[in-house]
Amino acid sequence: QRMFGESYVQELLPKQKSLPDDIEWHFIGHLQTNKVKYIIPYVKLIHSVDSFKLLQEINKQAEKHNIIQDVLLEIHIAQEESKYGLTPDACRKLLQETPWRELSNIRICGLMAMSSFVDDESQVLSEFKKVESLFEELKNIRKSIKNKEQEIKSKLNSIIHSKHVQEPVVTIRNGRFVVPVKNESRQEVKGFI
């Protein structure tokens, strides 16, 4: 199985058309509601849901294509303002107080978080442990945060050290070392390994 991640809608579309059909596309960047309609036909998993409004739009577009769209809720754990995502409290509130269960064309498969872009391994581990703890808490609150066969916990850091992989993880995104970044000033991840 080949999985490719893309951070930008405008870069995903031409790549999807020019690369082989058997690629499973994941959208890993910040997603605006007005761009959802462009990616829904092509992506298997959206890693960056950070609001109920975005969930509603994904559901609306998925319904038009008669699909169930898999998504991850993005949790903001980094000590950086430039990162997106729900705070743990906002995530709890979304799952407890919004009518997300009525959205029949989305499936919340788990959580995704980006740690701070630092060399301090203890800080990175601490941030991921917070996500792990939140995931376990939410699992107990809402048993429906699951995939058919496995729980998905997507954890990311721009630099992965072997010590970081001690924490449970299904997907590690670290494509900057696989696919060169177009503009070296950008820190976004560009693919999967």
Image: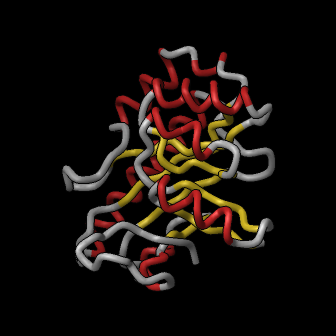
Quarter of the rendering occupied by the N terminus: bottom right
Examine the rendered structure and indicate whether residue 117 appears above or below residue 105: below
For the residue pair 167 and 8, the one nearer the viewer reads as 8
Q: Which part of the image, by quadrant, shows the C terminus?
A: bottom right
Foreground of the two, 176 or 137: 176
Q: Quadrant of residue 184?
A: bottom left
* In the rendered image, the vertical position of residue 95 relative to residue 177, given as above or below: above
Q: Residue at x 29, y 52 (%)?
A: 83
Display coloring: secondary structure
Residue 187 lies in quadrant = bottom left
Q: In front: 169, or 126?
A: 169
Residue at 60 percent across and 46 percent down: it is: 39
- Percent of width and height locating residue 23: 73, 67
Relative side of 83 to 137, left or right: left
Near-viewer residue (15 or 164):
15
Image: 143 above or below 9: above
Residue at point 48% right, 15% down? Answer: 97
Give x and y (percent) for residue 155.
Answer: 48, 61
Disc tally is: 0
Residue 73 in percent (x, y) is at 50, 41
Compared with residue 149, is residue 104 higher up or lower down, i.e. above or below?
above
Q: Position of residue 6 (x, y in %)?
A: 52, 62
The structure residue drawn at horizontal position 47% and vertical position 47%, both measured from the top left corner, is 48
